[in-house]
């Protein structure tokens, strides 16, 4: 079993923030960082805090994609519904959609459907902490911190200090 620790994750998120800040400084578009509940939203909060520390104004939002999943009716256990937090329209915004792990692409497809319920962004970029490959739909992240190939199809688990007491990616 492999793992990526807190210091590596912190450095990666710092690099992520720098990349977004540099692009935002060159653009006149309004920026919104929207995370997928339940780990992407925490990563999005970190990104927004880092951007604000660098003088970049970014809106923060979080969306629950449970009702947009294509497997909602097939799951043995129903996913808990959580409240999305998107107190603004996405019309004309440069949206950075944030998730922890990109795998089949189906979660991101559902997220895009949910996102467009809130307006029509000027553009959407996808940022993921880890990409484990294995796409079933043609979705690609614009920026990924870690490319992981787990042994024997093992699950990639992201642990974040806000909910799990530590930052760690296990695979």
Image (cartoon, helix red, strand yellow):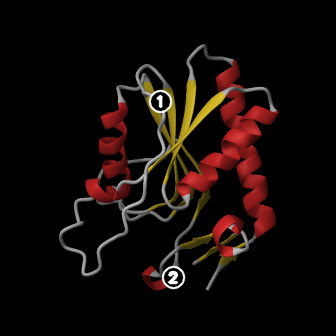
Residue drawn where x is 73% and y is 72% of the image? 166
Q: Are marks 1 and 2 in contact (CB under 8 Å)?
A: no
CA gap, disc 1 and disc 2: 42 Å
Depicted 73 relative to depicted 125: above or below: below
Q: Which sits in the foreground, 151 or 155?
A: 155
- Residue at image coords 28%, 56%: 67
Left or right of residue 160: residue 155 = left
Frontmost residue, 140 versus 85: 85
Say which mark, if any, is on residue 151. Answer: 2
Relative image position of residue 61 (x, y in whole percent):
53, 41
Going 60% across and 13% down the picture, which residue do you hit? 28
Say which of 137 and 61 sits in front: 61
* Left or right: 51 as drawn, with respect to 93: right
How many marks do you count on the picture? 2
10 Å crowding of disc 1: few (<14), some (14-19), many (20+): few
Picture coordinates of residue 126, whole percent (x, y): 49, 43
């Amino acid at each position: 079993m492999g793992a990526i620790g807190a210091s590596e994750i912190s450095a990666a998120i710092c690099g992520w923030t720098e990349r977004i800040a540099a692009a935002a400084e060159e653009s006149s578009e309004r920026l919104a960082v929207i995370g997928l509940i339940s780990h992407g939203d925490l990563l999005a909060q970190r990104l927004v805090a880092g951007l604000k520390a660098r003088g970049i104004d970014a809106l923060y939002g979080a969306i629950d994609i449970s009702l947009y999943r294509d497997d909602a009716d097939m799951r043995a256990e129903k996913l808990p519904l959580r409240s999305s937090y998107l107190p603004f329209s996405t019309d004309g915004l440069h949206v950075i959609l944030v998730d922890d792990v990109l795998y089949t692409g189906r979660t991101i497809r559902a997220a895009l459907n949910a996102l467009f319920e809130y307006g029509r962004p000027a553009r959407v970029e996808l940022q993921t902490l880890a990409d484990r490959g294995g796409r079933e739909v043609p979705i690609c992240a614009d920026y990924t911190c870690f490319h992981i190939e787990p042994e024997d199809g093992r699950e990639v688990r992201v642990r974040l200090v806000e909910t799990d007491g530590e930052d760690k990616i296990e695979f």
